[in-house]
């Protein structure tokens, strides 16, 4: 067993790509400083006194730059209330145009094979874990997952509100 570990270590440490990755991880790939400090930079030298009657040259401040962190927009990590005039109940068999006419344009549309998924905001995307989703197969509504009170589904939803996840494998 010890011999196998030694062989494994020898072959992996001999590989240039792995060695390079380890060096990056341990910050060994940084280039050394090209010049060492020639004077003490912790103390400022005393400024010489200006001769009488001579004004010191104006000092221009360095340009103000915003830190990169302040420029970034932080993502919203809580639910935002949702309100829309587009309300109504979707029924099985409706077409995509019927759903869009009822609920307005979706926030996202995904296609997978014969299925189309229309995503709508619901105000509880974070706490519910999903948008309101209308699922169409071959252009007709076959299922919907709805959480916003303004959206309804008259068919049998595969994920009604309050459903507790359960294993489906037996």
Image: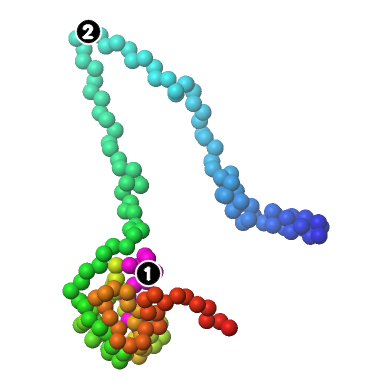
Viewer-proximal residue, 73 or 133? 133
Give x and y (percent) for residue 104.
Answer: 22, 77
Viewed as shown, does residue 71 lie left or right of 166? left
* CA neighbours of label 1 inside 10 A, class few (<14), some (14 to 19), many (20+): some
Q: Residue furthest top?
A: 52
Q: Which residue is disc 2 drawn over?
A: 52
Q: Which residue is disc 1 drawn over?
A: 128
Q: Residue at x 30, y 87 (%)?
A: 154
Nearer the observer, disc 2 or disc 1? 1
Q: Based on the picture, tell me whether residue 125 belongs to the magenta stretch.
A: yes
Viewed as shown, does residue 165 lie left or right of 14? left
Comes first in the chain, label 2 or label 1: 2
Q: Residue furthest left?
A: 85
Give x and y (percent) for residue 32.
Answer: 54, 37
State whether residue 53 is above or below residue 142.
above
Image quadrant occupied by the N terminus:
bottom right
Viewed as shown, does residue 165 lie left or right of 29? left
Image quadrant occupied by the C terminus:
bottom right
Image quarter for residue 45?
top left
- How was this image coloured? rainbow
Give x and y (percent) for residue 22.
Answer: 61, 51
Q: CA distance from mark 2 to mark 1?
A: 75 Å
Give the magenta part as a residue range: 124-135
């Amino acid at each position: 067993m010890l011999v196998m570990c030694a062989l494994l270590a020898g072959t992996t440490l001999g590989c240039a790509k792995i060695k390079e990755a380890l060096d990056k991880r341990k910050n060994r790939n940084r280039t050394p400083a090209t010049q060492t400090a020639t004077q003490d930079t912790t103390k400022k030298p005393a400024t010489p006194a200006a001769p009488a009657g001579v004004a010191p040259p104006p000092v221009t401040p360095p340009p103000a730059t915003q830190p990169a962190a302040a420029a970034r927009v932080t993502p919203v990590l809580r639910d935002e209330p949702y309100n829309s005039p587009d309300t109504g109940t979707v029924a099985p068999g409706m077409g995509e145009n019927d759903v869009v006419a009822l609920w307005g344009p979706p926030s996202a549309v995904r296609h997978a094979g014969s299925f189309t998924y229309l995503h709508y905001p619901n105000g509880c995307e974070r706490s519910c874990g999903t948008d309101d989703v209308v699922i169409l197969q071959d252009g007709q509504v076959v299922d919907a997952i709805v959480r916003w009170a303004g959206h309804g589904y008259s068919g049998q939803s595969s994920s009604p509100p309050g459903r507790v996840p359960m294993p489906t494998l037996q």
